[in-house]
Image (cartoon, helix red, strand yellow):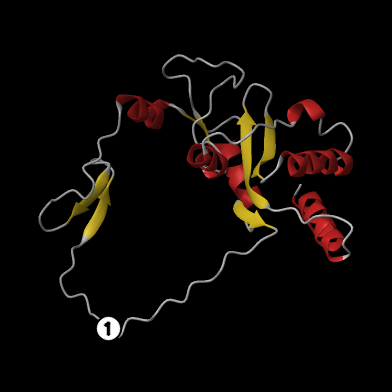
Amino acid sequence: MIGEWTQIIDTYKKRERRKTGKRLIGIKSLECNFNPKRRTYNPHYHIIVPTAEMAEILVREWLTRSNPGWTHRKGQFERKVVNTERDMIETVKYGTKILTEPDPRKKKYEKGQRKVYISALNNILMAFDGHHLFGRFGFNLPTKKIKPESKTTCVTDHKNWEFDPAESDWVEQNSGERLSGYLPTSELVEILKDGIDTELE
């Protein structure tokens, strides 16, 4: 996937230089989900580009370069950006889900059905190792010059925090103060206790 993506972007950079085409620009994220029912992985990109024409070019090139039988037109979903902030968050929110529904096709699930498939999660994270999950293509943002601070300050008043699993929080060792005050939901406690699958690969 990553090789095919690089070839597409490079091809259109060359076409722009030769004045035979436009450079493709946008932002992308790499995501991979696990389907425990089928025991399959679904690596895919989320992409935002400025025009429908550019989206069509990417889909056409993707289908042309992908292995036959691996990629289908019906799997390429396109839509117009309606809410920029929401759609940006949707594009870059995560590389993979920690919690997975036993049957991803079902929209509703009963409490306690979601699990952490730890072997599958490890496989995804290992496959991601060394790759950028989020990025931009076809453009660079202008660099901002930051003036260095003239003074160097030394921190002398610090606290000694240590994570306490029983508290689900960082606790200051001298005072017992909790850092976040976070209280896990009963559903999360149940998942951590009984919802981690260590067998399914």
- Amino acid type indicated by mark 1: Thr
Q: Which residue is mark 1?
A: 152
- Give how far across and how far down residue 114 sits, in percent: 48, 24
Residue 27 appears in the rendering: yes
- Give how far across and how far down residue 83 sits, in percent: 51, 36
Q: Is residue 200 above or below residue 66?
A: above
Residue 131 appears in the rendering: no
User: Residue at 89% across / 35% down in the picture?
Assistant: 68
* Quadrant in the picture for residue 129: bottom right
Query: Which quadrant of the rendered structure holds the C terminus?
Result: top right
Question: Would residue 3 appear left or right of 167 to someone viewing this image?
Answer: right
User: Residue at 27% across / 83% down in the picture?
Assistant: 152
Q: Is residue 147 above or below residue 108?
A: below
Viewer-closest of 39 and 5: 5
Question: Would residue 43 appear left or right of 69 to someone viewing this image?
Answer: left
User: Residue at 14% across / 51% down in the picture?
Assistant: 177
- Give how far across and how far down residue 55 sits, in percent: 74, 41
Question: Would residue 165 appear left or right of 27 to someone viewing this image?
Answer: left
For disc 1, the neighbor class at 10 Å (few under 14, some 14 to 19, many from 20) is few
- Give how far across and how far down residue 61 sits, in percent: 84, 43
Viewer-closest of 134 and 25: 25
